[in-house]
Amino acid sequence: MQKPKMAVIRGIRAAEALFYDAFKKTDIKFIYFSQNKVEYPIKTKNLRLVNELLKPRYFCDPIAILNGGNYTNRSLIQIENLEKHIKNTDIVCLSDTFYSWCDQAANLCNKYNKKLVTVVWETIPNHPSKFVPPYNFYIKNVVKKTDLFLLRSKLALKFAENIGIPKGEIKVIYKGVDLKLFFPREKQMRKSWPEANRPSDEKIKILYVGQLTKAKGVGDLLNIFVNLCNEFNNIELIVAGRGRLEERIKSMAKKYPIKYLGFVNYFDLPQVYREADIFCSPSKDLRILGFKVWEELFSYTLMEAMASGLPIVATKCGGIPEEIGDRNFLVKQGNREGMYNSLKSLIVSNEKRKFIGLFNRRRAEKMFDANMQAQETEKIILSIM
């Protein structure tokens, strides 16, 4: 019996591609889009990766004009050759509701009578996209033409209800990470010092992975780390990522024990996590003119940290509390004193790090196993055929 054909449409990300690669009963084409032709260096077993170019939806894209000629998620653009892909498939899977290409895909699904599945990450109920044209029109069109909505967190229910998604068309299911790729230090083939036998002078390493922006709280973490250095001489901060604060980090690394890695290939990340002792996620809501436009949704880095057996210090931002549970350290956004004390508590206690790290690994095994979550996701999608 021939497998149903599904087209997954979204920006490329290794974790996303590998998630859909775990589907077993569906023939999947992963259509990722870019401004310039890009071949993504990732090996997949069942997934076909297809790169298509973006182009202005109308005469020109005003967002790109304001952004030095570069497209953004808010650009009024469409995906070349998308009609050809959708015409030759059975199911189309989108990510989110308010992007221009979401509206394009919804119209094509309607034209060719294809099943449409829309994945919702957004969690802010009164997100500006609900009110600002043309994005609000895109939302209405996608909601009208979608057969099944997959929400990636319970918190996303607030956004879903606010834009009028019928409850009967909603399923909440978490994403996941490869637990064979991300695992704790103790399981390495070439073992370093076990936790209980670490030399007393070995550095305790705090890790941050993600964008280097103000909204991610990186500035707070840097200031807190400076204060920690005044109290401890056996700590190190590891930073992986790119962003506007890159130069500040490089400058501080000349004076403080900061190891800046820049962009790290996805398949090199697991070893970065295994070198660390504590993971920190100090995110803060992003507001423009008083309106909240972003909060932490459901972070891959937190799932990766839990799978790697790391204790976490994070802020109460968006979906973070739902994701990491109540055994980790959660502090109010921007509360530097609270974050300082939380990090200090883990720095001085080997037992506390081990206990929370073990809890996090078990939580990842129970809730964020990519293979299990992929099978469940595929089962739900195929139920609408």
Image (cartoon, rainbow, N blue to C red):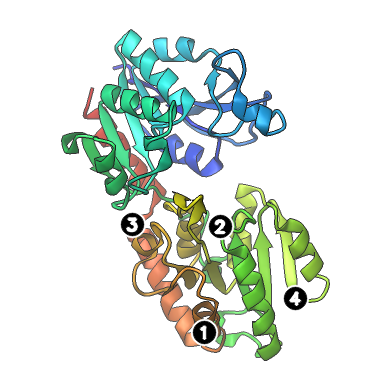
**Residue placed under numbered mark 2 in the picture:** 215
Would you call the spot at circle 1 few (<14 residues within 10 Å), some (14-19), or many (20 or more)? some
In the structure shown, which secondary structural element does the residue marked by tag 3 occupy? helix
| Residue 266 drawn at (x, y percent) | 61, 48
Q: In the image, is residue 24 above or below residue 144?
A: below
Q: Residue at x 32, y 29 (%)?
A: 117
3D distance between C-alphas at marks 1 and 4: 19 Å
In three-dimensional space, the C-alpha distance between marks 3 and 4, rounded to whole angstroms, equals 35 Å
Query: Judging from the image, what secondary structure is the residue with disc 1 in?
Result: helix
Residue type of the residue flagged with mark 1: Asn
- Label 3 belongs to which residue? 367
The answer to whether residue 341 shows anywhere in this view is yes
Q: Are marks 3 and 4 in contact (CB under 8 Å)?
A: no
- Picture disc at residue 341: 1
Q: Secondary structure at mark 2?
A: loop
At label 3, the amino acid type is Met
Q: Residue furthest front?
A: 289
Camera-side residue: 3 or 172? 172
Query: Is residue 130 shown above or below 337?
Result: above
Q: Which image quadrant is residue 13 in? A: top right
Single out the mark in the foreground, 1 or 2.
2
In what quadrant of the picture does the N terminus appear? top left
Of pointers 3 and 1, the one earlier in the residue sequence: 1
Residue 147 lies left or right of residue 313; in this view the side is left
User: Between residues 106 and 351, which one lies in front from this camera angle?
Assistant: 106
In this rendering, the label closer to the viewer, 3 or 1: 1
**What amino acid is found at the position of numbered circle 2 in the picture?**
Ala
